[in-house]
């Protein structure tokens, strides 16, 4: 092993007679060789026994003298466990095969013990684990919302305590704005992405559209969707994600950004929910016109993963998603027909989402915080390791310079569609991740659901704004530093 220590124990030396023989012999050969002999005893070292005995001999004309006997003990390193929670069921095999095994081959101090905990269960399970003084040593979290909930509650270790320069690296746009809180970085971004436009080249050709010319703006996107819908009763031009939970803001972010920064869900000072701004209402009217009434999109509760599966059937012409869905598209439609382009420009903006990342985090009170950091830094601190992680999950490296690593350059050459995401990320902007983030985002997502099913945009947004504002006001009323293991700390985590 790389860190094995060897101890050489000299158990016998040439006595006076032997020394005289050597000294008196003018023809002593200078060739010294080692030959193995039968193991005489075993030595327990660090729980394992690895012993070899050898005799070093000197050949002298007419006789052979033993100079010394050496017992060589190979000391096995002490290996400690690092408990890691991982949150993506569909990526568990990739994580184990391409990340965990690579880490184990690269060092022999720590052994990762990986447990799957879904994002939907993370808040409850991590809160309980912290209260019971048994959190994981490292935890992978997807997206801003959950990570922000915990670091605002003081539940994560400040990572700049381990690496004082960590906030100065060449991170992609928006990342430091998202994951730095009160001057400390609490989440290490391991992979990032933005949303881009997926479309089926075969359906484009069948509808008389040029598969090499994606739509330039929202109007062309809707026109293409209508033409694809006309191909048949079971063919849909496009699908729009509708989820009545906190996922909705994330997976519809690119559509909203097309209506400009005036669609921010909370004011710049963080105090006012602004669902009913003129621009936000205009965006929701677009949803009602094109989703509820357009006839070219199905109206149903469905998230990005569900749409990915339906896109893979070849019966959906277009949708918008993150790069994690790219490999699915290629496998389902083939490399030539799985087309990806930069997100079409909206009526008011060509901005795209940025800053949303999968992260590694180190909870406070972990049993092996140093091991948690070793694994985290192994991924973040090396361009090849970071690129193995990003490519394994079909994502983008979080540091700009890591795009040019050997590993990621090879991934880009083999998967040229990824360049659409890299280009789009360059001007990425983040979405809301502040106080009462869960309640605010859930209210927004429920507004999308209601309007997609035919509700009035202004009326619906007014109702949801009131609910979100009450949650935000309550959070500010209860604002205080949490005591993590007391009732107040747990409550603070749950209401962040």
Image: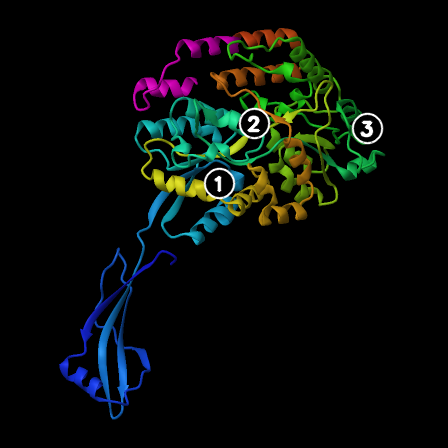
Kind of element beneath mark 1: helix
Label 3: element kind: helix
- Where residue 210 appears, as percent x and y from the top left, is 83, 36
> Can you say which quadrant of the picture contains the C terminus?
top left
| Residue identified by numbered label 1 | 380
Q: Residue furthest bottom?
A: 62
Residue under circle 2?
174
Q: CA distance from mark 1 to mark 3?
A: 45 Å
Check the image and report above or below for 317 versus 68: above
**Measured along the vertical axis of the image, is residue 115 above or below residue 28?**
above
* Residue found at x 83% / y 33%: 207
Give the mark nearest the N terminus, 1 or 3.
3
Q: Residue at x 65, y 7 (%)?
A: 458
- The disc placed on residue 227 is 3
Q: On the image, which quarter does residue 280 sit in? A: top right
Is 480 colored magenta in this rendering? Answer: yes
Identify the disc placed on residue 54: none
> Which element type, helix, strand or loop, lies under badge 2?
loop
Which of disc 2 and disc 3 is earlier in sequence?
Answer: 2
**Image coords of residue 167 (percent x, y):** 48, 32
Q: What range is drawn magenta here?
A: 467-496
Mark 2 surroundings within 10 Å by alpha-carbon count, few (fewer than 14), some (14 through 19), many (20 or more): some
Q: Residues within 10 Å of mark 1 (few under 14, many from 20)?
A: many
Does residue 369 appear to the left or right of 196 in the view shown? left
């Amino acid at each position: 092993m790389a860190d094995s220590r060897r101890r050489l124990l000299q158990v016998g030396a040439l006595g006076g007679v032997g020394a005289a023989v050597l000294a008196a012999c003018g023809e002593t050969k200078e060739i010294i060789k080692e030959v193995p002999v039968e193991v005489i005893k075993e030595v327990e070292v660090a729980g394992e026994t690895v012993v070899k005995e050898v005799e070093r001999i000197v050949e002298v004309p007419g006789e052979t003298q033993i100079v010394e006997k050496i017992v060589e003990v190979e000391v096995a390193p002490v290996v400690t466990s690092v408990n890691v929670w991982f949150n993506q069921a569909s990526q568990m095999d990739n994580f184990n095969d391409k990340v965990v095994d690579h880490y184990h081959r690269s060092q022999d101090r720590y052994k990762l013990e990986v447990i799957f905990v879904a994002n939907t269960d993370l808040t409850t399970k991590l809160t309980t684990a912290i209260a019971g003084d048994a959190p994981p040593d490292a935890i992978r979290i997807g997206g801003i919302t959950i990570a922000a909930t915990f670091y605002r509650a003081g539940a994560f270790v400040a990572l700049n305590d381990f690496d004082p320069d960590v906030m100065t690296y060449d991170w992609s746009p928006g990342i430091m704005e998202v994951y730095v809180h009160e001057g400390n970085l609490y989440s290490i971004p391991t992979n990032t992405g933005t949303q881009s436009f997926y479309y089926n080249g075969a359906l484009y050709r069948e509808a008389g559209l040029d598969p090499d010319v994606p739509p330039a703006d929202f109007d062309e996107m809707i026109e293409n969707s209508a033409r694809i819908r006309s191909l048949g009763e079971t063919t849909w031009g496009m699908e729009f994600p509708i989820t009545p939970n906190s996922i909705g803001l994330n997976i519809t972010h690119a559509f909203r950004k097309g209506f400009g920064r005036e669609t921010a869900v909370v004011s710049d000072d963080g105090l006012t929910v602004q669902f009913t701004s003129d621009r936000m209402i205009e965006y929701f009217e677009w949803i009602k016109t094109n989703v509820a009434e357009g006839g070219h999109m199905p109206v149903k509760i469905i998230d990005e993963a569900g749409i990915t599966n339906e896109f893979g059937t070849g019966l959906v012409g277009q949708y918008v998603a993150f790069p994690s869905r790219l490999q699915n598209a290629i496998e389902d439609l083939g490399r030539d027909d799985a087309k990806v382009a930069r997100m079409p420009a909206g009526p008011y903006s060509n901005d795209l989402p940025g800053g949303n990342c999968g992260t590694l985090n180190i909870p406070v009170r972990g049993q092996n915080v140093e091991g948690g950091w070793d694994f985290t830094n192994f991924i973040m601190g090396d361009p090849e390791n970071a690129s193995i992680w990003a490519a394994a999950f079909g994502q983008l490296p979080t540091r700009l310079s890591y795009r040019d690593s050997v590993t990621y350059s090879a991934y880009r050459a083999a998967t040229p569609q990824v360049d659409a995401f890299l280009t789009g990320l360059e001007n990425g902007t983040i979405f809301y991740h502040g106080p009462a983030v869960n309640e605010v985002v859930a209210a927004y997502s429920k507004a999308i659901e209601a309007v997609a099913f035919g509700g009035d945009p202004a009326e619906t947004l007014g109702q949801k704004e009131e609910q979100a504002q009450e949650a935000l006001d309550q959070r500010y009323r209860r604002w205080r530093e949490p005591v993590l293991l007391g009732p107040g700390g747990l409550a603070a985590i749950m209401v962040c």
